[in-house]
Image: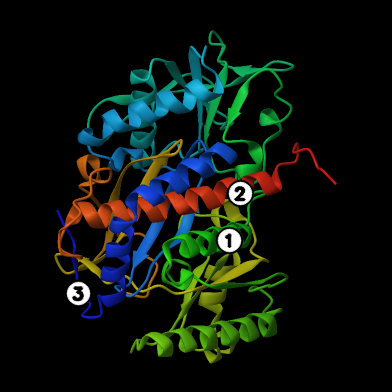
Amino acid sequence: MVPHLITALTGPINELEQRILDSMPAIERWFRLEWMEHTPPFYSSVDIRNAGFKLAPVDTNLYPGGWNNLTPEMLPLAVQSAMAAIEKICPEAKNLLVIPENHTRNTFYLSNLAQLKRIFHMAGLNVRIGSINPEIKEPTSVALPGGGSVLLEPVVRSKRRLGLKDFDPCTILLNNDLSSGTPGILEDIHEQYLLPPLHAGWSVRRKSNHFKSYEEVAKRFGKMLGIDPWLINPMFNHCGQVDFDQGTGMECLTTNVEALLAKIRRKYKEYGINEKPFVVVKADNGTYGMGIMTVRDAKDIDALGRKSRNKMSVIKGGQEVSDVIIQEGVLTNERINDAVAEPVVYMMDRYVVGGFYRVHAERGTDENLNAPGASFVPLAFAESTRLPQPGEKPGASAPNRFYMYGVIGRLAMLAASYELEATDPDAEIYD
């Protein structure tokens, strides 16, 4: 299903699409050279917003769930990419242990595990799922909504290794974003490959660091392409020491919201955009669409009611919010039927393997769609992201739009690789 753009102001995005298609050889070479210098995250997913005048990533996840939303047509690409990723890290890999989130009752999440297991099984690995949830004391089989089941087994830790009772893996794949901190059971593992590394978890990672890296990537990419990097980069500010519960640190928030709204207004004026600017305030770490609010006027911060403050004060795992990122809001002007939609791009190693649209019938164009009530519509990414159709009128060809999403997704993935290098506790420091 090809979503339609409802905006009349498609000029800049059509120009951007044209520029990207015309520069395809240069873009692919640019990425190749980057990957010679940097290691891509093992896997990632990127939420993208297409405003018609701007196309930008708004979130990058290094422990993507939702693999069950990829279509069967996308699997061969995912399997090939999984093979490439594993080959680089541990060519002799035989056993892979997947460590999931502790949502043992969320069957959609468990369907995602089943899909990951399928992908790595087809990539030639024995795959088992080892839970660190203290409630899982013996092998537990959970039935899935579409048929089939997932077997969760309790992990066993020896002095230097992690495994299952009768299963010794050389590679451990985390599908747990460590929002609640790093469990001791995962620390000091010396003889096995842990993917992604622990410092990719939300106990260390910060969105403001990621978007700082992305800003650098967007500037360099924009220079190569001859475009204003703002067209692909959401501006942001950062505020530490905010306490929504007590209502302290709000001056910092108000000042930063005001400053960012003024910057967006200037850009809108420059491009003749007649939209009302907005920003999105969200927890600087964490995911699952928690701790997020849309702000259209700095005065709204002072008027925050108790209910809104409570919603902002904690994120997944009951973690309290003290650091926030204030991000330029990017409208989504894509629709599936009449519902607002945003693309999510999935990658493994350095390859785009597929994606889907997150669709929400009850949300507006300037709201977070990662919320209860969202549904997922597969993208026709499978055969098209690598095969754009130059010569087609901009905005008219689905493969071209999906190729463009793939480019933005890979830029965000490259930013994540910069970010991980900068926060690696084991990196050698050179003077």
Q: Is residue 121 left or right of residue 310?
A: left
The foreground one among 136 and 8 is 8
Q: Amino acid at mark 1?
A: Glu
Mark drawn on residue 418: 2
Q: Is residue 311 left or right of residue 141?
A: right
Locate residue 29, reporting x and y percent.
43, 45
- Tell me if I can see residue 134 in this picture: yes
User: For mark 1, does the 10 Å Cα neighbourhood hold few (<14), some (14 to 19), or many (20 or more) residues?
Assistant: some
What element does badge 2 sit on? helix
Q: Amino acid at mark 3?
A: Ile
Residue at (47% x, 69% y) in the render: 229
Earlier residue among tags 3 and 1: 3
Locate residue 236, reporting x and y percent.
56, 72
CB contact under 8 Å: marks 1 and 2: yes
Farthest right residue? 431
Rounded to the nearest whole Å, what is the CA distance between mark 2 and mark 3? 35 Å
Rounded to the nearest whole Å, what is the CA distance between mark 1 and mark 2? 10 Å
Locate residue 81, reporting x and y percent.
39, 30
* Residue position marked by numbered label 3 in the rendering: 6
- Tell me if I can see residue 114 in this picture: no
Earlier residue among tags 2 and 3: 3
Looking at the image, is 178 positioned above or below residue 247? above
Q: Nearer the viewer, mark 2 or mark 3?
A: 2
